[in-house]
Amino acid sequence: MSIIRNRKTSIASRVLRAGISAVFTAFTMVAAFAPLAAAPEAEAFSKSDTIKIMPVGDSITFGQGEDGGYRKYLDYFMKQKGYTGIDLVGPESTGGGGGWGWPGGGGGGNPSFTYNGQTVEYDGDHAGYSGFQIKQPASWGQDSSLYNKLKEKNAIKTYQPDIVLLIIGTNDMTANRSMSDCANDLRDLVDYMLGDMPAGGKVYMGSIPEFTMYGGNPEKIANYNNTVKSVANEMADAGKNVEFADVHGALDGMNDIGNDNLHPNGKGYEKIGKFWAETLDAYISSGSSSGQTEQPTQGSDPQQPTQGGGQTSGSADKSRTIKIMPAGDSITFGQGEDGGYRKYLDYFMKQKGYTGIDLVGPESTGWGGAPSFSYNGQNVTYDGDHAGYSGFTIKQQPNSWSNDSGLYEKLKNNDAIKKYKPDVVLLIIGTNDMTANRNLDDCASDLRTLVDYILADMPEGGKVYMGSIPEFTLYGGSPERVGNYNATVKKVADEYANAGKNVEFADVHGALDGMNDIGNDNLHPNGKGYEKMGKFWADLLDDYLSASAVVPTEPPTDPPTEPPTEEPVIAGDLDSDGSVTAFDLVFFRAGLVNGFSSNKMKRAADMDGSGTPEVNDIVLLSKYLLGQTA
């Protein structure tokens, strides 16, 4: 293989030692002349680290119908993200011998494929076996148990993967196996893999794609995928480094399945590869597992477990009050289902342990107290505040159905942003602009006006997510029109982000299964669609808030040489909230451009004690947040 296999340090062991998401006691540093103390010893991950990844499963991992399957796209997209040490491992290989799973590396060099007009080489090693079940031998042959095959080849001990990507179960479903038997087999398989993996090794348990061959149907697949998720969550709750990965959700149902109605087509494999690459990038770059917390440090609470429940990543202060404003049109309002996605967002954030979430806005579902809904057999109350207005366009349009139907004007006239001070705005707007056949350039201009207003009135460091709109076919809606508009939203969001503003594109549309998640009116999401949107936003916010967690330094051992003459500050704490987080980095960047709003903020920004905040200080703050020695 062209990738060096001899790594200097296992990334699994680095995950256990990395200090990026660890939480320590905050400290106070006095005056601008006090230098930043050394951070606790921690290793920041480099994209050149050798990371061993084992794709494991059946014919979908093998790549039936397209040599290399999703694996070649995974390898490609990881390299595109800058990872130079990715090493796909396993006892089988695509390439060198005709692509039929030749053991030990293929025997003829790296396989390749053509992508975007270029010939791309990829690492063909894997552990994918066509026709295999989880553990129970399939009826067509005795050598068809993945569990037995891996144990027979001593695959995990031999190849020592840092991460396992597991997709298995399609053949169990074609054999009509019971869910309880599948769950037991999954537990045995994953326990075996974890037992032989390096310390800190991670197993992703993937859902299976849609299929209709051999009795496949949406209900059967959904039941199985729920079983996979249940087992993954159960293991994570037991402190094991296991996480559910919704491969099925990354695909567009049968549209991404080939002519055999069983295996993904080329586009499907590409989407799976991209999904895995994004999942791995988020995991590796975070420096910690979503299923594992930091090992206790000296002086930490001895009762604190070494591994967490796998519900969230990072180490955000989940009791902190976080104001979130859902803003938009009837989709935010919740047309067709009271509370829409907002009630699910509130529910899922609470399930992740956030106790300070405050949905805000000038409107509300349920003015007579907290509204509620029934979910999983329970009555659940939720925060009904929002800024969603049915029938609204981005800005007021001439000859509209109403003289009060522009979101920009509505929010501005109500002084909504200044009044409610949201830390985060979730913006989904544009469906009504598309039903009115508006020009995309005009829409882009209106979006800029709206977002500029929101950013200007938000608290410092406020975040705006610009969401794509769901599919619709009413009033001339079509995949092409929706796709073009969503590309415009992404372009505008990226434009802001590239200019250093705290704006990010959020692919709400991609979280839904096309028109399958749209109601009978062919315009608004159905209950399942709203639920998916709420979960999408909750996962996104959890990632964002966790990434803002602080890694403070230890208290200085020597007292200052002279008593402080000014109010003490924490070096790097520009928002004066008592801790150093990614929010402070946003304030720093804004201060360098627009000036610092107070002398206290300016002193907090002077990381090296030179007396003047400058580019070197922002470099020190960035390193500090990454756990590097400043």
Image (cartoon, rainbow, N blue to C red):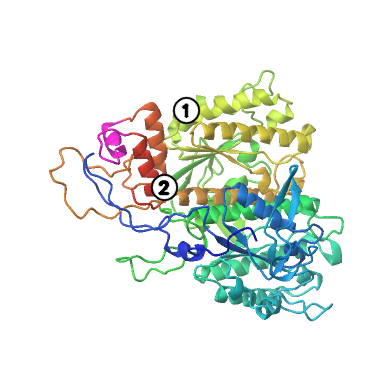
Mark 1 and mark 2 in contact? Answer it, CB < 8 Å.
Answer: no
| Residue 112, quarter of picture | bottom right
401 lies left or right of 495: right
Identify residue for label 1.
Answer: 415
- Residue toward you, 4 or 343: 4
Q: Is residue 136 magenta?
A: no
**Residue range of the region highlighted in magenta in the rendering:** 598-613
The residue lying at 58 percent from left, 35 percent from top is 494
Q: Is residue 28 left or right of residue 251?
A: left
Q: Percent x, y for residue 327? A: 56, 36
Q: Which sits in the foreground, 575 or 258?
A: 258
Residue 395 seen in this snapshot: no
| Circle 2 residue | 321
* In front of the other: 417 or 307: 307
Look at label 1 and name its amino acid: Asp
472 vs 556: above or below: above
What is the quadrant of the N terminus in the image? bottom right
